[in-house]
Image (cartoon, rainbow, N blue to C red):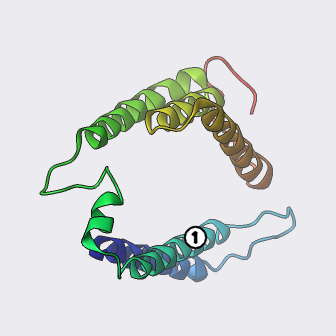
Amino acid sequence: MVAQRVLGAGFIGLGALAVAFGLGIQELGLGQNRDPGPRAFPLALGLILVGGGVFEWVASWMHWGRQPEEKEARSEMEVRDGQVPRSGLRHMVGLLIGLCLYVAALNWLGFTLSTMVFSLAMMILLGVRWPVGLATSVGLLFLIHVLFRMLFKVQLPAGTLGLPL
């Protein structure tokens, strides 16, 4: 409970800093080329962080009245007595190895294929069924394509294979 409140407060504080930074940028967006400008990303990121922080803060207060046995049954991944459960360690190590392989494969496979493989592998590692993971990975790639390629006009790494997107 306390950790969730601290996380929420941290998100709110970090988001407020990002919003303040974004508001401090003097250049106007949506100019002649309909570019959102340099203020858009820090403002959007800050607002998302503040929203997530408020969500965490409210969620921590909603669980305040639970009985101890309910809290204990809430998560098998919870750290107890300073010991991380084996499944949590497996997830941490798998994520770290996957992230290293993702960075290494990015130049060779390109952004599209390496992101697809990484996101699907991480979801399967965390227990998501592969059809759901595949659909989520495709949706993630579509969202990234729309946001970065179409809206911000950012060239994503094509890799040695030169795959489109």
Whether residue 73 is situated above or below residue 101 in the rendered picture: below
Q: Residue at x 32, y 58 (%)?
A: 73
Q: Quadrant of the C terminus?
A: top right
* Left or right of 34 on screen, residue 18: left
> Residue 39: horizontal and vertical position, in percent?
64, 72
> Residue 23: horizontal and vertical position, in percent?
59, 82
Q: Quadrant of residue 75?
A: bottom left
Whether residue 8 is situated above or below residue 97 in the rendered picture: below
Q: Quadrant of residue 2?
A: bottom left
Q: Residue at x 48, y 36 (%)?
A: 122
Q: Residue at x 51, y 71 (%)?
A: 52
* Left or right of 89 on screen, residue 131: right
- Residue farthest toward the left in the current orientation of the protein: 81
> Residue 86: horizontal and vertical position, in percent?
24, 38
Whether residue 96 is situated above or below residue 7 in the rendered picture: above
Q: Nearer the viewer, residue 49 or 106?
A: 49
Residue bearing mark 1: 48
Q: Nearer the viewer, residue 75 or 124?
A: 75
Q: Secondary structure at mark 1?
A: helix
- Residue farthest toward the top in the current orientation of the protein: 161
